[in-house]
């Protein structure tokens, strides 16, 4: 093993699992250096600190600063939901938690957690409230003081091999089995909300602007739920060149657009449909992606009379080759 070419070591590492990689890195220094590049192929990031199974923005910065580990990250899952502001005092927070216990529903957003236990001591609530306070302090630092974008702008340029980003809001995106569905709400008895009812807007702007300032060639982007208002925000209109630079290399795009607060009725067209059709905002955005091979856009609402969604088909015989005046030769 001491005389194997680095290329061969890379070939070996591509087929090894996590624990096999850990053992492989113990052989010698060359194996340790090469194996480290494959040790973290994907990373799950949350805005708040929580369990050891995922990372916060601070952890992302540490991984991005590592000379070898940063090269192995090819996929980033970003879950950046926020709690309601301002921070609740203990009695108000406990009263809300007791309401959840009465309903007997899981507190997790993805509804995969066990039911909240109805019998808790005051010390249990004190411990969980302390965790809630820590999460709120993180939120005040990253969101209220706008440090989130600064951390991403510093970290993402170092992830030179990053190819895929998934922005997961309200657990709308289908995640693979490798992701652990843990979040800060699992420990605080407080379910996240979106403060301004525009899910994903702040997060996607922060991610794409950070990518635009790097040398990353992004291949896949999945975002959902993303408020349709993203297409008429000041950032989208003012920073179109930067957003286009971040997305110009995409081969796969999947968006779930949220039309929060609108009712879908047979006799009228929702405002989101009307605006996007009138302005052609989606078409202008897609026109910046000449290499698209897979495209899916769906409309979804949490407050509507009937489920409304619009999927852009992606087959050679469909009209997906020519959507809103745009044509992609590679779309299949």
Image (spheres, rainbow, N blue to C red):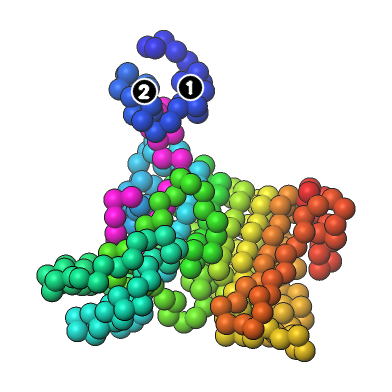
Furthest-right residue in view? 317
Is residue 7 shown to the viewer in this render?
yes
| Residue at the spot 64% in from the left edge and 59% down from the top edge | 254
Marks 2 and 1 sit apart, C-alpha to C-alpha, by 9 Å
Residue that carries the numbered disc 1 in the rendered image: 12
Q: As drawn, is 302 to the left or to the right of 194?
A: right
Nearer-the-camera pick, 247 or 48: 48
In which quadrant will I find the N terminus?
Answer: top left
Residue 174 numbered tag = none
- Kindly identify the residue that appears in the image at 64 percent across and 83 percent down: 305
Disc 1 crowd rating (10 Å Cα; few below 14, some 14-19, many 20+) is: some
Q: Do callouts 2 and 1 mark residues in contact (Cβ within 8 Å)? A: yes
- Does 37 lie within the magenta span? yes
In the rendered structure, does residue 62 fall within the stretch colored magenta?
Answer: no
Q: Which secondary structure lies at badge 2? A: helix
Q: Is residue 308 left or right of residue 191?
A: right
Residue with the mark numbered 2: 24
Mark 2 burial class by Cα count in 10 Å: few <14, some 14-19, many 20+: some
The picture places residue 99, in percent across and down from the top left corner, at 31, 81
Q: Secondary structure at mark 1?
A: helix
- What percent of the width, then of the height, locates residue 300? 62, 73
User: Which of disc 1 and disc 2 is earlier in sequence?
Assistant: 1
Q: Quadrant of residue 245?
A: bottom right
Which residue occupies 45% across, 27% down?
Answer: 16
Which stretch did the figure color magenta?
32-53
Asked whether 115 or 132 is in front, the reply is: 115
Q: Position of residue 105 (x, y in %)?
A: 38, 71
Q: Quadrant of residue 228?
A: bottom right
Q: Residue furthest left?
A: 123
Which quarter of the picture shows residue 309? bottom right
């Amino acid at each position: 093993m001491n005389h194997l070419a680095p290329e061969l070591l890379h070939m070996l590492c591509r087929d090894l699992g996590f624990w096999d990689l850990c053992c492989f890195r113990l052989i010698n220094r060359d194996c340790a250096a090469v194996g480290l590049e494959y040790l973290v192929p994907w990373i799950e990031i949350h805005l708040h600190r929580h369990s050891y199974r995922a990372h916060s923005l601070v952890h992302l910065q540490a991984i991005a600063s590592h000379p070898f580990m940063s090269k192995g990250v090819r996929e980033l899952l970003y879950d950046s939901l926020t709690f309601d502001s301002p921070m609740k005092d203990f009695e108000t927070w406990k009263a809300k938690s007791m309401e959840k216990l009465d309903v007997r529903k899981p507190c997790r957003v993805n509804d995969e957690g066990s039911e909240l236990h109805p019998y808790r001591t005051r010390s249990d609530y004190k411990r969980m409230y302390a965790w809630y306070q820590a999460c709120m302090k993180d939120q005040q630092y990253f969101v209220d003081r706008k440090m989130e974008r600064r951390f991403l702008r510093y970290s993402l340029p170092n992830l030179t091999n990053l190819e895929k980003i998934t922005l997961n809001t309200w657990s709308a995106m289908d995640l693979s089995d490798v992701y652990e569905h843990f979040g800060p709400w699992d420990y605080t008895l407080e379910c996240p909300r979106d403060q301004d009812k525009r899910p994903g807007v702040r997060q996607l702007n922060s991610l794409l602007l950070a990518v635009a300032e790097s040398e990353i060639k992004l291949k896949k982007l999945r975002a959902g739920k993303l408020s349709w208002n993203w297409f008429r925000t000041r950032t989208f209109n003012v920073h179109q060149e930067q957003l286009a630079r971040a997305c110009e290399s995409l081969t796969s795009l999947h968006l779930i657009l949220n039309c929060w607060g609108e009712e879908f009725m047979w006799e009228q067209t929702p405002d989101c449909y009307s605006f996007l059709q009138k302005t052609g905002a989606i078409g202008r955005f897609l026109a910046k992606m000449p290499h698209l091979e897979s495209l899916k856009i769906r409309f979804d609402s949490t407050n509507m009379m009937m489920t409304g969604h619009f999927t852009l088909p992606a087959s050679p015989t469909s009209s997906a080759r020519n959507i809103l005046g745009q044509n992609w030769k590679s779309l299949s």
